[in-house]
Amino acid sequence: MKENKIVLSMKNISKEYSGNPVLKNVSIDVRAGEIHALMGENGAGKSTLMNILFGMPAIHATGGFQGTIEIEGEPVVIDTPTKAMQYGIGMVHQELMLIPGFTVAENIKIGREIGKSNFLSEILGKSMETLDTAAMNRDARNALDSVGMTSLREDTLVEGMAIGYKQFIEIAREIDKSNMRVLVFDEPTAVLTEDEARQMLDALQKIVDLGIAVIFISHRLDEVLEVSSQVSVLRDGTLVTSVPASTLTPNSLAELMVGRGMSSEVRSASGPRPDFSKAPVAVRFHDFWVDMPGERVKGIDLEVKEGEILGIGGLAGQGKLGISNGVMGMYPSRGCVEVFGQELQLSREGDALRHGVAFVSEDRRGVGLLIEDSIENNIVFSAMQVKKMFLSKKLLFTQQDRHAIREHGKKMIDLLDIRCTSGAQAVGRLSGGNQQKVLFVSEPTRGIDIGAKELVLDYLHKINREEGVTIIFTSSELLELRSICDRIAIIAGGKINSILKPTVSDAAFGLAMSGIKPEGGEEE
């Protein structure tokens, strides 16, 4: 079989930030019509390498980089994203880059809008053309269909959509571009369920079948080894190896990434679990509705026992994300939610926080973090606002207790292995996975690597079992839910289809997610 030609070479790439080397002589070759996986822990240098390839301003505003980039054997200078696109390089970023007030089609066609001539444009020129909305919608429809989003209307506003839908829109935008040589996908399946991830991987295969090279960054090791031809592994800014995917296993790949032996990705679901049948109710939902676009909840009844970890799973768009967002007041909700016997005032902003309910959003940049503020301030912000912790009084004034904040920040940074220069570093300067770990209470482990995931799951398990914290844990990863949860509620069509034991078969979970009640495995 003839080997595909090298379409991209990055040679001896090095990069420093404030004297701190983050990439050290990294070289990779990427071939046309192949999926090349780029692997490594958060902070290993993957995003920096891809930002160099895409000409991101942050690279050139901080001294540029050393090394060369070649496209089909010719050296090129890529110092802006526009240059990258001119050379046929596209990128789907881990942090979504959509305009909320635009429609799906407008986001897909942004920068490549289609004009329609009119009387004024015939006289005054192209600047007076109007948008050919019908043509733009047709292009968007083709791109959406190619990634399996047949149910998503191209004329719908992006604002308020579930994050999984936004991910597909980003990818459809890249597919719509012409003259593409290389497409970079940074965690494209991180926010997707297993079925949706399968749909995404099928779309990636269609892309490489067109002769386009794909650079694929993911922390789901099984899917990486399934679809990739070549795997390059970075660790601490250095290229550890670049080998055919067929030579690796999930365990050997994990060890290359972290530089140490790993336990299984998640703990076994078959271990002994406490009996919560007689435990008091911690959270009770009755006829609970949430109007979250794309994730509507349609009248659920549910009891969560004190001290348990209840998982919430289901396909994107079925309502699983709406539950926690509705409780926290992010979207309009109605019905009854009781926390330890006290009913929340759903229309009162912050009432859930005042009742001791903590929330880590799946949308870390949009909702979960104060991006321009420091790591340590992000860690203690809610505690200061709600519980008046980390404050001290001097004379008549209340001010932040900076010593206590620094000490607690150091403790959490060490515990969760947040890769940073200090607790004073702005959260916006962290890698995507490290941003997730600043807020650690419950919600998904989207976009964090296998080592970090193990830390987060272990810590959740620890505070649950040792401190009795009740956790409602929403995730798109069934394996993750089964590893840590005592029961798993599957949401379909905005309602609870079934509440299953984590040990039931994959088939039972599959049926429940598709809206069919499985036989056996449900709670008594």
Image (spheres, rainbow, N blue to C red):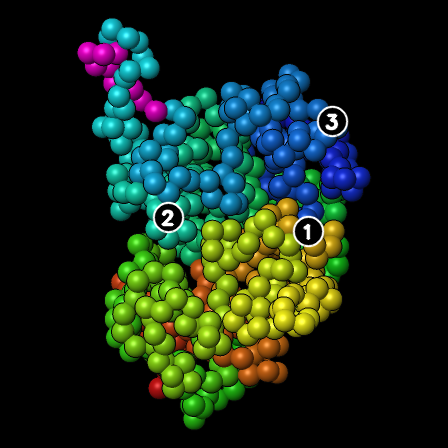
Please give the name of the residue rendered at 31% of the width and 12% of the height, measured from the top-left corner.
126
Q: Nearer the viewer, mark 3 or mark 1?
A: 1
| Identity of the residue furthest to the top in this view | 123
User: Which quadrant does the C terminus fall into?
Assistant: bottom left
Q: Which residue is mark 1?
A: 425
Q: Which residue is mark 2?
A: 165
Q: If you read the primary sequence from the N terminus, does the residue marked by circle 1 or circle 2 appear first?
A: 2
| Identity of the residue furthest to the front in this view | 396
Please give the name of the residue rendered at 25% of the width and 18% of the height, measured from the top-left corner.
116
Amino acid type for the residue under numbered disc 1? Gln
Amino acid type for the residue under numbered disc 3? Gly
Span colored in magenta: 113-121
Pinpoint residue 63: horizontal percent, then vertical percent.
72, 30
Q: Which residue is mark 3?
A: 67
SS under mark 3: strand
Please give the name of the residue rendered at 57% of the width and 44% of the height, measured from the top-left corner.
217
Q: Is residue 207 left or right of residue 436?
A: left
* Residues under numbered marks 3 and 1 in contact, where contact means CB atoms less than 8 Å apart: no
Q: Nearer the viewer, mark 1 or mark 2?
A: 1
Would you say residue 359 sits in the magenta stretch? no
Q: Is residue 87 visible?
A: yes
Q: If you read the primary sequence from the N terminus, does the residue marked by circle 3 or circle 2 appear first?
A: 3
| Identity of the residue furthest to the right in this view | 19
SS under mark 2: helix
In space, the residues marked 3 and 1 are separated at their CA atoms by: 28 Å
